[in-house]
Amino acid sequence: MSTFSLRRNTCYLKLKTLTYYKNKIVWITGASSGIGKAMAIELSKHGGYVILTSRSKDKLEKTKAELQDPGQAEIVLLDMADSDAIDSVTTNLLQKHGHIDILINNAGISQRSLTLDTDMKVYHRLMNINYFGVIQMSKLLLPSMVAKKSGHIVTITSVNGKLGSYMKSGYAGSKHALHGFFDSLRAEIDDSGVDITLITPGYVQTDISMNALTKDGTPQKSMDSNTAKGIPASTFAQKALRQIAKGKAEIIIAGGIESLGLYLKRFLPGVLRKLTAGRKEA
Ligand SMILES: NC(=O)c1ccc[n+]([C@@H]2O[C@H](COP(=O)([O-])OP(=O)(O)OC[C@H]3O[C@@H](n4cnc5c(N)ncnc54)[C@H](OP(=O)(O)O)[C@@H]3O)[C@@H](O)[C@H]2O)c1
């Protein structure tokens, strides 16, 4: 491809990102921190109206203040483990706006504990926040999207949605479940006009490991070195929004080591098993 056509394609993609989000109502869960916050900031640059939800009012206020146009945003408190709250918040937002154009299922929590040691309540919490909350909200919004013949449900999963790793059995289980659910839903609503996108991140520099649940459900409160060395959340957000605008079914945004893991899982699973056996991630 010539330099001229490469430049023309890059310009076209940037333009497509700029226009895709303009005047769209975009709901981002987990917008108080990390990836969700970065996506909200990036989206506001492209003219989207953003609904920011999480449990932390102060942090959401900070996200809102950093948006290009804080007037084009609203904050709603929502705990993704509270199914009654998910019902009422979604119903209220649909009544207020008439529809949601794009749902970004981002809120999530990780885990750092061995299966043999981990209390079952930790597994229930991981599934409630990472899986049941996500599918409940998506199911509540889906009928209005199908009726309108347009809409986009984007879900942030993880490389751990494709492969398991040490001390993350509950987290990996919850993220694998998302792939199963949304791949099935995509097949069911293929010609409905509603897009389903799964985003599979590798390591991103956020507080995910600080907030990861340990065996008794208390947070780890320390930063993993792999997460600290991950890509900046702002870079992740820019890449993700460009790919979402293209309507891709699945997007992988991962560094070399995580990409290698995905490759081995697909083509040489035995090698991956040998390489990861007994291997604690940092
Ligand atoms: N960072 C990575 O390396 C990485 C890699 C792969 C996948 N991911 C995924 O990316 C997503 C975002 O995580 P992050 O890396 O940005 O981590 P983060 O900085 O810890 O942010 C997590 C977000 O989820 C929200 N959240 C957690 N529990 C919640 C609950 N019960 N109800 C509502 N919101 C809740 C938090 O908000 P409040 O605490 O204010 O409620 C926060 O806004 C997660 O789904 C995670 O699994 C991250």
Image (spheres, rainbow, N blue to C red):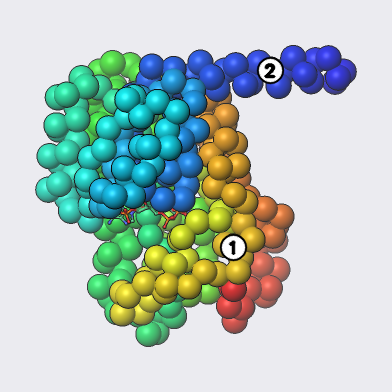
Q: Residue visible at 31% across and 74% down? A: 217
Q: Quadrant of the N terminus?
A: top right
Mark 1: which amino acid? Ala
Mark 2 residue crowding within 10 angstroms, few (<14) / some (14–19) / many (20+):
few
Q: Which residue is mark 2?
A: 11
Q: Which residue is mark 1?
A: 228
Quadrant in the rendering for residue 152: top left
User: Going by the image, does 218 lie left or right of 110?
Assistant: left
Out of 190 and 48, give the one closest to the viewer.
Answer: 48
User: Going by the image, does 259 lie left or right of 178?
Assistant: right
Provide the secondary structure element on which disc 1 rests: helix
Mark 2: which amino acid? Cys
Q: Residue visible at 63% across and 73% down? A: 276
User: Going by the image, does 141 lie left or right of 32?
Assistant: left
Query: Which quarter of the frame holds ligand 1?
Result: bottom left
Q: Is residue 205 above or below residue 19?
A: below
Q: Quadrant of the C terminus?
A: bottom right
Q: Is residue 75 above or below residue 109?
A: above
Total marks drawn?
2
- Indicate the position of residue 206 as horizontal and vertical percent values: 50, 56
Which one is in front in this view, the residue at disc 2 or the one at disc 1? 1
User: Going by the image, does 63 lie left or right of 83?
Assistant: right
- Indicate the position of residue 70 as horizontal and vertical percent values: 36, 29
